[in-house]
Amino acid sequence: MNFYKSCADILQRLSDKKGSIKSLVGSLPEKDRKRAAALVIETLKYQPLLLSVIEASGILRDEKKLLRDRNLVLVLVHDLLLSKGGIQMGDGPVKQAVLKHKTRLNAEFVKEKVKHGVSRTEDLAKSSVPNDTDESQGGNLRRWVRINTLRTTEKEVMGILSSQGFKYVEADSQEDPRSFQKDVHVPNLLSFSPTTQFQDSALLKDGKIILQDKASCFPAFVLNPPADSRFHVIDATAAPGNKTSHLSAIMKGKGRVTAFERDKKRFQTLKSMLDRAGASNVVPRNQDFLSVDPLDSEYQSVTHILLDPSCSGSGIVDRLDYLVNSENDTNTAEIEERLKKLASFQLKMIRHAMKFPSLQRLVYSTCSLHTTENEEVVVQALQSEEALEGNFKIESRAKVIPAWPRRGLRLEQMDESVPSESLVRCLPEDGTNGFFVACFVRVNGKQPSDHKRKAGELGSDSEAPNDEAGNGKNMVNSIEDGTAKPRKRKKRKKKHATGVVAT
């Protein structure tokens, strides 16, 4: 039952424009993903047909007490009518409610075939996808593979790929599907033909490679936390864990990364991902980042935060997007209202992150194409009390993938404090998903005023978590070029507070 409910939830989230098929299926436990992908995709292909059959059968009217979720009925009726194995779940009241209408559902199904003049069921499926479809990537997207240096080396992976018949070439070769290249912007990132499959690869199962879109690699790469045991980094919205494991790899497994994920199911996915990736310096927390007290002694030494909050997902490209009904996309007022709510939440997350007293570098990213969630949020963040009090600005282009050509959009409300060339944008024609990245940095080491802190709520510098706990010492206020030195401590009789040991 839980499996069908999960698939029904994916259908609802797709309808609400809260992700792509690939990303939503990827949030499920690994053991369910293949089966769930098949059921969701096939249900979407036959959705108009199934809805007509369900409506004509009267099942929703007659079983309204048990069958309240239309999407759940959709996936169950799909398996009843179109799956050889039928409905694969225990005999409960929900299953019995559907089976009670089996004869009527089959009769309405036959009527639909007659009405459309077809004899084969597959002729009733949506068929607007090109013949050369790859169901995992879309448009000009490449297949991006990040080498996980926590488990292996570039040399080892290149050798294994060569033994499997892949050929490394300097330039992109569209004619040879077995060729691949090294990315010119992100280290340890390889580019393959979009038709290349790695689902059954031992490299993937062993955590030696991670399937991660190039644009998704930008946030951790731009944040660039030092590989130093004294540093404490936060991934504020961590699941499914690709960016988190990338942070861990950049830090070479040193220091500490606290990874927050509030959703219980996604938290389990995060833990599984981190375990497979060998990200031993990551401390996963099943907690809402907004509920974290920045002045808690455990987080006083946090210097870097990666923030990739919920967004519209408008930049995610999937060759299966044609299956998702877009009839409501023309409701401009509804879309704008939803974007405003998302932007308000995103701004709230940024402002909360800026409250961490030792924060020096904050990367904000979305997989959205809308300026409402991107440049406009950045402008509002820089005008916030937290940014002004903490003296945050936008990092210079020279330290935000300077060679990447596509930069932020210039808006009328932008002044010199928001240089659009310092912002990063990606579009599908770049071979990636649509994406946006902005990097905030604290200037001149200015810290929030002491009068903002409650008496006794925040200890002195000497009470920061110690090295043995892996939480990092307090750093000098200005972190330049990805390096830092420990702040000189004053001698005090009081013992240091002990942080939580990374596991």
Image (cartoon, helix red, strand yellow):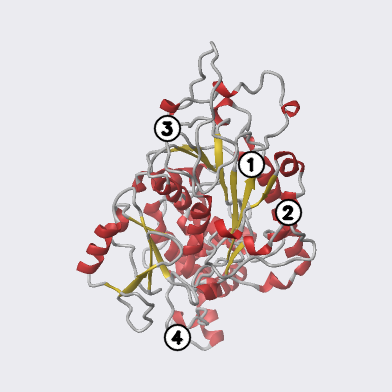
Alpha-carbon distance for marks 1 and 2? Answer: 19 Å
Lower sequence index among marks 3 and 2: 2
Residue 46 makes an appearance in the image: no
Lower sequence index among marks 3 and 1: 1
Residue 118: horizontal and vertical position, in percent?
48, 87
Q: Residues within 10 Å of mark 3 (few under 14, many from 20)?
A: some
Q: Are marks 3 and 1 in contact (CB under 8 Å)?
A: no
Lower sequence index among marks 4 and 3: 4
Alpha-carbon distance for marks 3 and 2? Answer: 35 Å
Specify the amino acid type for callout 3.
Answer: Ala
For label 3, the residue is 502
Specify the amino acid type for callout 2.
Answer: Lys
| 95 is higher (above) or lower (below) than 112 | above
Specify the amino acid type for callout 4.
Answer: Ser
For label 2, the residue is 341
Alpha-carbon distance for marks 4 and 3? Answer: 61 Å
Q: Residues within 10 Å of mark 4 (few under 14, many from 20)?
A: few
In the image: residue 230, left or right of residue 437: left
For label 4, the residue is 119
For label 1, the residue is 353
In the image: residue 133, left or right of residue 394: left
